[in-house]
């Protein structure tokens, strides 16, 4: 233990020396930042950063290259200084993490030793406490179950029981002794017993009153049943008497109906005989009518045949006449066509002859009707006025 404490005591001195060396290195590199920062104003005066240079000329390009180098070189120096300044810091961080991990490992070994002992004792106490709580809960539940199951549940058991059955349950509850075995629940048990007995006595009184009422109702129902039975017997007697009267009346109705049926049968026979006589007379009359109709139909048929024969002969005559007319018409058309054919063949000669006649000196001596005929023929042949 003492050796471990000596190591822990020496550790801060070692760490302080390492940190001091790292800080010295960082300060040396950061001094370059200050130097560069101090030169920016002069650099701005010498090479303004927003100056426009004509790089199309050789002098302008040379000046631009020099200005770029003037700005670029310190920028690169800043980056190098940044990396150089961070390197000791990063290394210091690694050293701190490694050293802290070593110290933590040494310290946790001692901490875990005592922590495991503390947690084991705490767990033991908690288990003991839980066991006591469970035992207490079971003890309390046992008393509650005894009160509920042995005393209070009697009320549920008395539901639907007769007054005698409830009296037996009351006796059982009264036999229960509420003593020190109930411990601190003795008062609750006594109260539950008293309330249960009071409720059971009320239920017994109600059951007894209900039984008395049911007995009264039963007596009334039996009396009512006897009255109804007497009335039913009287009703059956009345029904039997009515049935006898109905039987006698039915026999009388049957006799009357039989006599009526016989009278109706006699009337039907008379009506049927009369109807038969009427049917026979009607049939004779219909036979005579049918004979007369047949004779008239024969005469009408003969007349229709005569008219049909005359119509057929007339139709044949008309058809022959129409055929003769059509034949004559065909012959006339054939003659006309032949004349037209001749006219077509001789038309030009005839037209020339007619025109010659009209132009000759003898035209004036021709009669007027002949002139009209000639002119009309020329007009029809040429399609122009003569």
Image (spheres, grey):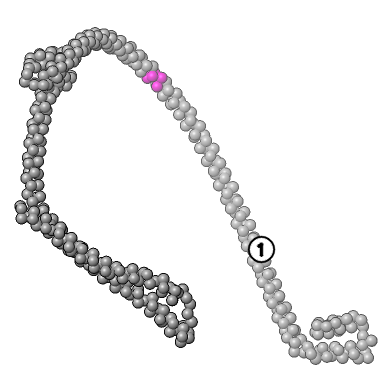
**Which residue is found at the position 10% from the left and 24% from the top?**
143
Q: Is residue 131 visible?
A: yes
1 vs 118: above or below? below
Give the percent coordinates (x, y) of residue 344: 75, 87
Instruction: Sort mark 1 into few (<14), some (14-19) or many (20+) by Cα contacts within 10 Å.
Output: few
> Based on the displayed image, in which of its 4 quarters is residue 101 positioned?
bottom left
In this rendering, position of residue 61 left or right of residue 314: left
102 vs 353: above or below? above
Q: Which residues are magenta?
A: 257-261
Closest to the observer, 138 or 62? 62
Q: Is residue 95 magenta?
A: no
**Which residue is found at the position 23% from the left and 66% from the top?**
24
Closest to the observer, 1 or 360? 1
Closest to the observer, 241 or 60? 60
> Mark 1 = which residue?
314
Q: Secondary structure at mark 1?
A: helix
| Majority secondary structure in the magenta region | helix
**Which residue is found at the position 36% from the left and 69% from the top?**
37
- The quadrant of the rendering that contains the C terminus is bottom right
Give the percent coordinates (x, y) of residue 138: 9, 30
Give the percent coordinates (x, y) of residue 330: 69, 77
Give the percent coordinates (x, y) of residue 214: 21, 12
Closest to the observer, 326 or 384? 384
**Which residue is found at the position 42% from the left and 23% from the top?**
264
Q: What is the tally of numbered marks visible in this picture?
A: 1
> Based on the displayed image, in which of its 4 quarters is residue 64 positioned?
bottom left
Q: Is residue 226 visible?
A: no
22 vs 298: above or below? below
């Amino acid at each position: 233990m003492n050796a471990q404490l000596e190591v822990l005591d020496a550790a801060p001195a070692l760490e302080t020396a390492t940190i001091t060396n790292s800080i010295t290195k960082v300060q040396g590199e950061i001094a370059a930042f200050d130097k560069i920062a101090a030169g920016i104003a002069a650099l701005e005066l010498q090479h303004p950063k927003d100056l426009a240079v004509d790089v199309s000329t050789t002098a302008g390009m040379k000046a631009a290259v020099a200005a770029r180098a003037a700005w670029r070189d310190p920028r690169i120096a800043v980056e190098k200084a940044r990396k150089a300044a961070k390197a000791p810091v990063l290394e210091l961080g690694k050293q701190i993490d490694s050293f802290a991990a070593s110290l933590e490992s040494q310290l946790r070994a001692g901490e875990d030793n005592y922590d495991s002992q503390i947690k084991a004792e705490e767990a033991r106490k908690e288990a003991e406490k839980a066991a006591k709580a469970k035992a207490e809960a079971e003890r309390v539940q046992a008393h509650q179950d005894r009160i509920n199951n042995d005393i209070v549940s009697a009320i549920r058991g008395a539901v639907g029981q007769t007054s005698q059955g409830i009296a037996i349950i009351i006796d059982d509850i009264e036999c229960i002794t509420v003593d020190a075995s109930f411990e601190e629940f003795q008062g609750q048990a006594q109260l539950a017993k008293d309330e249960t007995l009071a409720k059971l006595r009320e239920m017994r009184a109600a059951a007894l009153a209900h039984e008395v009422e049911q007995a009264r109702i039963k007596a009334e129902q039996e009396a009512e049943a006897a009255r109804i039975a007497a009335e039913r017997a009287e009703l059956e007697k009345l029904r039997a008497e009515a049935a006898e009267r109905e039987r006698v009346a039915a026999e009388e109705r049957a006799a009357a109906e039989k006599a009526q049926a016989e009278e109706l049968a006699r009337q039907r026979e008379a009506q049927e005989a009369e109807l038969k006589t009427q049917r026979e007379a009607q049939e004779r009359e219909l036979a005579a009518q049918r004979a007369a109709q047949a004779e008239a139909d024969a005469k009408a048929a003969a007349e229709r045949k005569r008219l049909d024969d005359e119509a057929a002969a007339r139709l044949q005559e008309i058809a022959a006449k129409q055929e003769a007319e059509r034949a004559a018409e065909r012959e006339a058309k054939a003659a006309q066509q032949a004349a037209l054919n001749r006219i077509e063949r001789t038309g030009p000669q005839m037209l020339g002859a007619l025109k010659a006649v009209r132009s000759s000196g003898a035209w004036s001596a021709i009669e007027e009707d002949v002139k009209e005929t000639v002119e009309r023929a020329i007009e029809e042949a040429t399609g122009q006025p003569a």
